Image (spheres, grey):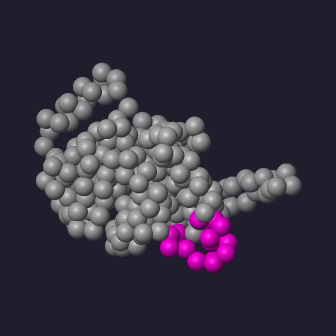
Amino acid sequence: MGWLKKWRRRKLDKEPFPEIWERILGQQIHLYRQMSRDQKKVLRQLVHYFLAEKSFEGCGGLELDDTKRVTIAAMACIPLIGGVSDLYPYLTAVLVYPEMYHAPYSEAGVDGVVSEGVESRRGESWDQGVIVLSWDEVAYDVRNPRDGSNIVMHECAHQLDYEWGATMEDFSWQQTRNQPGMALTLKDEYQRYVASLRKTHRSVVDDYAATNIHEFFAVMSETWFERPDVVRRYFPRVDRVFSDFYNLEPDFGKFGIRSSGAYKS
């Protein structure tokens, strides 16, 4: 972290956290209400930094107010409480549409033929430092905090993938002689999941996880924070590597930090 960013953060630390932001966290963020006093303090600090350092832009006529900005910032920062990232260093801007939006796509088929068109989206993450969100989808996630789906956490997981190369096979975090690293574990679990889905056509998580290894990581991440019981029961190896990677123990009725700041770069 550069000296200028450190200086700006020290200035923010001296400022009181706005009372209206505190009320928004209490009203909008289910996990915030479960956290200890120290965990809430960490999240407030991260939210303060996030709102100061990331650009927010309302698109499609959407007016961004404190409720929208603080809610999105909090959802983005919850996965960082254990120290996995210093506020997504490659992320610079958050674009928010009022509802599902249309975006062009270009895709090459196995035969090399490129198909182009326009598709509806509720969110996306760019490796150029941008996430795009539908506020309708974020608001739905606020109302349904235990359904295993969270668009902000999903897109921010992609940012972590860009930062760490978490799904690349040479990402050997926590690899030992007896335990494969995170990327190899994710690869094995992804292949097992896809094979099971093809056989049974049933999935305990969003079947968008079958799209590719990157979407598997993102879907598993959002599910782990909202429905950790599902991941622990059906994907115990993913639960193990996520506990190490995120340095957290999400659970019903509590939100634990195993040890603070282990993976900050």
List x then y, in percent, for residue 186. Answer: 54, 53
**Measuring 44% from the left and 41% from the top, which residue is drawn there?**
174
Q: Is residue 174 visible?
A: yes
Based on the picture, tell me whether residue 217 belongs to the magenta stretch.
Answer: no
Q: Please identify the quarter of the rendering in which residue 141 is found.
A: bottom left
Q: Quadrant of the N terminus?
A: top left
**Measuring 50% from the left and 70% from the top, which residue is drawn there?**
205
Q: Quadrant of the C terminus?
A: top left
List x then y, in percent, for residue 109. Answer: 80, 56
Q: Residue 200 versus residue 57: which sits nearer the camera?
A: 200
**Measuring 67% from the left and 75% from the top, which residue is drawn there?**
199
Furthest residue in direction top, as rendered? 3
Residue 46 falls left or right of residue 216: left
Identify whether 149 is placed above or below 245: below
Residue 259 falls left or right of residue 114: left
**Measuring 57% from the left and 37% from the top, which residue is drawn there?**
170
Residue 146 falls left or right of residue 255: right
List x then y, in percent, for residue 34. Answer: 21, 63
Q: Residue 207 versus residue 134: which sits nearer the camera?
A: 207
Identify whether 3 is placed above or below 217: above
List x then y, in percent, for residue 143. Answer: 34, 73
Q: Please identify the quarter of the rendering in which residue 236 is found.
A: bottom left
Q: How many marks?
A: 0
Furthest residue in direction front, as rendered? 178
Q: Is residue 62 visible?
A: no
Identify whether 172 is placed above or below 189: above
Identify whether 177 is placed above or below 108: above
Residues shaded magenta = 193-206
